[in-house]
Structures are given as C-alpha cells and as structure tokens.
Amino acid sequence: MTRSTASLMSALVAASLLAACASTPPPPAEPLPPVPMSFDQTLSGDALFAFGKSSIDEISAEGRVELDALAARVMAAAALDVVHVIGHSDRIGAARANMALSNRRAGAVRDYLVQAGVPADRITAVGRGSVEPVAECDGRGQALIDCLAPNRRVEVKVLLP
C-alpha cells in the first residue's frame, strides 16, 4: 500500500469514527402543561340533597360519585392553599330559610371533604341563599321546582399555591 493510499485510508477511518461519535442533539422536550393555579367544580344540589334538605345521609348515587371525584381531585393536588365551598338555593321559600339551607349544605360538603382527608383548616364554607341564580323561571308547583334545579347547587373553588 502506498503512502498516499494509507493516508487516504486513515483519513476515511478517522472521518467515519468522528461521524459515528458525533451525535445529533435530542429534539427539544415537549413543554410541560401549565400547572393550574385553581379549579372550580359545581355540584348538583339535587344530586346531593333532597329538596329543601341539607343532609348528605340520603345522597343519590350520582351525588356520591360527584363528591368522591371531587375529594379525589382535591387530595391529588400536591399542595393546597384553600378550598371555598359555596352553597346556593333556589328562590322558593323565605330568604332567611334559603340562606340557612345554603349554609347547611355548604357545611355538609365541607364535612364530607374533611372526612375524605382534606385538611379542615384549608376549607371555608358559606351559603349565598338565592342571591346568585343561574336560571330564572316562571311557573308554579313541580314545574317551577324542576326549572329552578340549576340554582340549587354547591360550588367548590380550589386554590393552589
């Protein structure tokens, strides 16, 4: 083998080794989804409570699923700032009674979350009565009760640090 052939072979081997050692940079990592600073969930008052009642003892299967899913979601948060539970009622009945009912319903949801493991010192509960309706209805009797169902709700606002 001639000297120029040997030099050429050495150059080819060196170039091959360099090419084999050279690595392409990995593609840029996918950005992580933004960490939510809070989340809200509205629970159906009719799924949680009998009409005009505030006890969770007779909760429907739908209501139990809603509460259990909420409790799991709150407990899955790595850190928790505060959980606001806000009870609402419809306009049927006296304003004072509706305020008391919405307070008791908010308290019942708060107690449920505490039993599920959410720290009690991180939860507030308040009733708003019928002052923040989401549905306006006319009518009487059962038709009115059915129409006003969206107003009978419990809102849960979870704030993360």
Image (tube, rainbow, N blue to C red):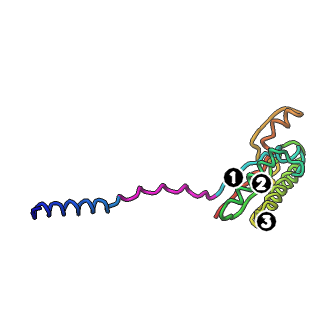
Task: Name the residue located 77 percent from the left edge and 52 percent from the top edge.
Answer: 68
Dot 1 alpha-carbon crowd within 10 angstroms: few under 14, some 14 to 19, many 20 or more: some
Q: Is residue 20 above or below residue 41?
A: below
Q: Main secondary structure of the magenta part?
A: loop
Q: CA distance from mark 3 to mark 2?
A: 15 Å
Q: Which residue is mark 3?
A: 120
Stretch of the chain drawn in magenta: 24-37
Closer to the N terminus: mark 1 or mark 2?
Answer: 1
Closer to the N terminus: mark 3 or mark 2?
Answer: 2
> Quadrant where the C terminus lies?
bottom right
Secondary structure found at label 1 = strand
> Could you tell me residue 74's position as x and y percent?
71, 58
Task: Name the residue located 68 percent from the left edge and 64 percent from the top edge.
Answer: 80
Secondary structure found at label 3 = helix
- Give, as a three-letter code, the residue at label 2: Ile
- Depth order, front residue of 37/129: 37
Q: Which residue is mark 1?
A: 40
Q: Which residue is mark 2?
A: 86
Secondary structure found at label 2 = strand
Dot 2 alpha-carbon crowd within 10 angstroms: few under 14, some 14 to 19, many 20 or more: many
- Give, as a three-letter code, the residue at label 1: Asp
Q: CA distance from mark 1 to mark 3?
A: 18 Å
- Give, as a three-letter code, the residue at label 3: Ala
Given this view, does label 1 or label 2 mark the residue nearer the observer?
Answer: 1
Tag 3–tag 2 contact (CB < 8 Å): no
> Could you tell me residue 128's position as x and y percent?
80, 52
